[in-house]
Amino acid sequence: MTVKKTPLNNIHKQAGGRMIEFAGWELPVQYKSAMEEHLAVRENVGVFDVSHMGQIEISGPEALAFAQKVTCNDISKISNGQAQYSAFLTPQGTFIDDIVVYRFSEERIFICVNAATKDKDYDWLCAQNDLGAGIEDLSDSFAQIAVQGPRALETLQSLTATDLGAIRPFRFTELTLAGFPMMLSRTGYTGENGYELYLPPACAEAVWKTIFASGDEYGIRPAGLAARNTLRLEACYCLYGNDIDEEHTPLEARLGWIVKFGKEFIGKEALLKQKEDGISRRLSGFEMIEPGIARDGFGVLIDGKAVSRVSSGCFSPSLKKSIGLTYLPVDRSNPGQEITIDIRGKQRLAQVVETPFYKRPK
């Protein structure tokens, strides 16, 4: 399979990015230091190339009705210009993908999907389309740049006449920034204030360079996949393929708040039954008590018995400790519960803690 390159590929290499294959794309995992990139986002401003993400648009008179059927959150409860975290689910109530829905109107629903699942998502949507809605994969029409951190607003505000401070979280707008028309949203995947720019691929390099010129006085840094992962884990945002997948439901993943039972959607009956019966496992956060870093896939034991694996784990640059997520039996998932992590054959003590691990200072 040919590895794809984003429109910013040359920019990353010129900046010293260490490139790896991720979800079929060549992307920078880090530049000089993943920890420095992480802290730049927490303290100042960092910029990510997320052009590998997919974009699918549902359109036409049946757009809203169809989007309601294939997503578990309730799009009818948000206004035009508002975004919503949601998911595509199997009939069994498990995750096909987690998504961000952008409502332009009842006849235009724009959805950002994960890179690794984009083709699967598109094929699944087409297979479910018994309402005649328009479905279009627009992924090749967009580059996407995420500007994240406490100085993100100041970095971008000088590049547009639109008042970015007036854009509330999970809202979006179309504007001109750095001289180019684009869509700007305020969602974020880092736990910090941040903005996502959806723009034509041809202008991505020019916009990237302009952003860095504007943010130079704020200590702006390019950030790679490694920093994106540690930032989202500190904020306890799930990663598809690690923490959520076709084996787990939103109720098990502590994402029941995105499931709205007051409407019809694929997977509803299975989730109603699970809600009635009660879940047997729950995604839980933990931190290491004994030395060691809990990495993805390491075994998790309680009272010497294997119960799960670490779904996501890392050393937290902000908290200076090892943290992770894992599915635990519900009756053993409360804060204070001691668990053991098998770190390459060595048993190391950890304990369940409240999540998120990190909260942005107010």
Image: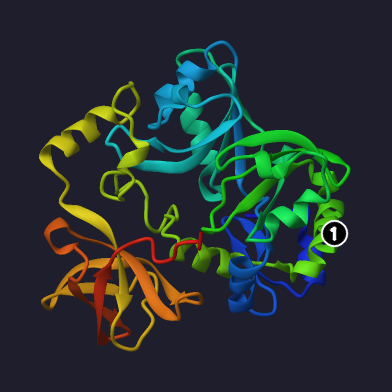
Q: Is residue 344 left or right of residue 28?
A: left
Q: Is residue 4 visible?
A: no
Furthest-top residue in view? 61
In the displayed structure, would residue 99 be above or below residue 212? above
* Image location (x, y in percent) of residue 257: 34, 40
Q: Can you say whether 156 is above or below 256 in the image?
A: below
Residue at x-position 29% and y-position 37%: 93
Q: How many numbered circles are shown?
A: 1
Residue 192 seen in the figure: yes
Q: Position of residue 171 (x, y in %)?
A: 59, 37
In this picture, residue 305 sits left or right of residue 126: left
The quadrant holding residue 154 is: bottom right
* Residue in the picture at 60% in, 14% down: 60
Indicate the amino acid at tag 1: Lys
Front residue of this view, candidates 97 and 219:
219
Name the residue: 76% across, 66% down.
12
The color scheme shown is rainbow
Image spot of residue 84 (x, y percent): 49, 36
Dot 1: within a 10 Å radius of its alpha carbon, few (fewer than 14), some, or many (20 or more) residues? few
Q: Nearer the viewer, residue 316 or 62?
A: 316
Q: Please, what secondary structure does the residue beneath circle 1 have?
A: helix
Residue 250 vertical position relative to residue 333 in the rendered view, above or below: above
Q: Quadrant of the N terminus?
A: bottom right
Q: At 56% across and 58% down in the image, what residue appears? A: 192
Q: Which residue is mark 1?
A: 209
| Residue farthest toward the front in the current orientation of the protein | 362
The percent position of residue 3, horizontal first and vertical second, equals 67, 57
